[in-house]
Structure formats: C-alpha cells, structure tokens
Amino acid sequence: MSDIQINIINKTYPAIEQAEAHTAIADLNLTLKSGEFICLVGPSGCGKTTLLNIIADLDNDYQGNIGLSQQSARPKIGYIFQNPRLLPWRTVRENIELVVDDPLSIHIIDSLLELMQLTASQHVYPERLSLGMSRRASITRAFAVEPDLLLMDEPFVSLDAPTARQVRALLLSLWQQRPHTVLFVTHDLREAIALADRIIFLSASPMSVISEISVPIPRAERHDETAIETFRQQLLNDYPAIKQLL
Ligand code: ADP
Ligand code: MG
C-alpha cells in the first residue's frame, strides 16, 4: 500500500436546536507512511474520533480530501472503536466471522484467536467476557479483515495496567507479523512512546497539528519502562506545550 495523504480543510458539525455549529477540524495535513505506527495525542474533544470517522469513510460531510483515491485498490480498513462494540447475540467467534467473507480465512481466525489467547473463549457470548477479553476480541475482529490501515480509538482505556501491557504486546506482535499502517489515538504519553514510530500532537478544537516527533527507542527496548519514562520526561522538557494536551 502507498502512503495516505490527509488534507482536511474544514469539518464543521452543523447547528442543531440549541447547539451552535462547531468547527471540529481546520487545515489539518498529515501523511501516513505505509507500514508506519502513528499515535495521535490530543485533548479530549479536539476531534480525534471525528478524524478517524472521516478516514474510515463513515463521515463524508467535510471539505478536503483523504488521499486513498490514488491507490490502485481501496485499502482494507480495520476500525477498533473506543468501546468494543461486539454484537451481544453472537459468540466471540461469530463476531469475528461476520467481518470475514472469504471461507478460506478460517485458518486466519484460528491463528488470531490463538495469538490473542481467546481460543478457549471463542464460543462464549460477549456478556460473559471481562473488559480485557472484549478488547482482545475486538482487536482480533479488526485484524481478521487483514487491514492495510488499522484505526484504533483509545482502545485500551479503562484496562488495568498489567492487562493493558499484555494487550499492547499482543498488538505489536500482530503488527510486526503482518506490516500495515496503524493510526492509534491515545491520551497516554507512555502508551504512545511504547507503541509509535511517530507521535503527532494535536491542538484543542479546531484540531490541527502542533508538533510531531519520532520515537528513537529501538523496538526491542520498548518494554523497558525506564527508557520510556526517560524519553517522556525529555519530551515534556523539550515541548512544554505537550503537558496541556494530556
Ligand atoms: P475527541 O475524539 O478528540 O474527544 P470528537 O471527535 O469526538 O473529539 O469531537 C470533536 C468535537 O466535535 C467535540 O467538541 C464534540 O463535542 C463535537 N462533536 C462530535 N460529534 C458531534 C456531533 N455528532 N454533532 C455535533 N458535535 C459533535
Ligand atoms: Mg474520541
């Protein structure tokens, strides 16, 4: 897949009843390089979910252009929403099978379930799952479409720290096995440093890019919490404006 150019001139939610019109995004330009893991960090309400919805083609009501059209075929997009959004009347496995139209992909589902440690729970209904298991099931579902671009909207919020660490490690191992572009929204600077090739810091509404940094810590050392904390402190010293975004 080639790079994705994002150019949003304006995204305004129209006035409805008492609420005034609200410009969520203005003059946003981003390039997502093929295979890159990008984290977006910005304050609550700045327009991150709006941006992911536009990229996923769930929202066409904006001025601008998402440069997917130059691609020979439309890239396959996996979208992991902030809430796992599993269908309650389907088992874990049935939720995943729903997004896979190729019967030959059954073996992919089996191996993903295995990797995400869900094989034993595959016939369970969502209400019986812990939050961590639900998150793993929604990640498995997004990976089952074998995406070229994976959108993740604060997917690990409200997981306890050890579970979040475990799910992050599983995510990275899936990403390394099958390279694709990832756009990952988070509030947590440590999480961004642990995951990203590049972190993009976004302003409050209307959203635009404040700064971007590449994470220099080698992949093999990303589990090292001291290295992550040292880099975090360095970032906060070098870019004091970041503190207001977290
Ligand atoms: P974030 O994901 O960064 O927290 P959102 O993209 O959800 O932010 O929202 C950006 C801004 O747009 C917020 O001020 C929010 O209130 C507003 N907004 C989001 N969705 C709608 C909508 N459907 N109608 C009107 N305003 C909206
Ligand atoms: Mg959001």
Image (cartoon, grey):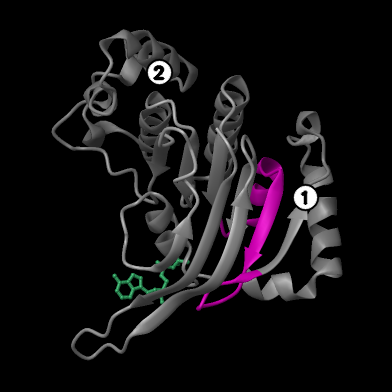
How crowded pointer 2 is (Cα within 10 Å; few <14, some 14-19, many 20+) is rated as: many
Quarter of the rendering containing residue 199: bottom right
Residue 74 at what x, y percent from top left?
Answer: 40, 37
Check whether the beta carbons of the residues at disc 2 and disc 1 lie within 8 A of each other. Answer: no
Residue under the point 26% across and 85% down: 15
Q: Position of residue 96 (x, y in %)?
A: 29, 26
Image position of 18 with respect to 77: above or below: below
Residue 197: say if magenta.
Answer: yes
Q: Which residues are magenta?
A: 186-209
Position of residue 50 in the picture relative to residue 42 (left or right): left
Q: Secondary structure at mark 1?
A: strand
Dot 2 or dot 1: first in sequence order is 2
Which residue is rendered at x = 39% and y = 51% of the image?
Answer: 82
**Residue labelled with disc 2:** 113
Question: What is the quadrant of residue 91 in the picture?
Answer: top left
Residue that label 1 marks = 214
Left or right placement of residue 142 versus residue 204 in this view: left
Q: Visible in this render: residue 3?
A: yes
Q: CA distance from mark 2 to mark 1?
A: 32 Å
* Amino acid at dot 1: Ser
- Name the image quarter holding the C terminus: bottom right
In-image side of 126 versus 176 (left or right)? left
Is the shortest distance between ligand 1 and the CB of mark 1 under 8 Å? Answer: no
- Quarter placement of the N terminus: top right
Query: Is 126 rendered above or below residue 242?
Result: above
Q: Is residue 171 above or below residue 215?
A: above
Q: Secondary structure at mark 2?
A: helix
Residue 113: x and y in percent read: 40, 18
Q: Residue at x 64, y 43 (%)?
A: 33
The amino acid type found where label 2 is placed reads Leu
At 80% from the left edge and 70% from the top edge, which residue is drawn? 239
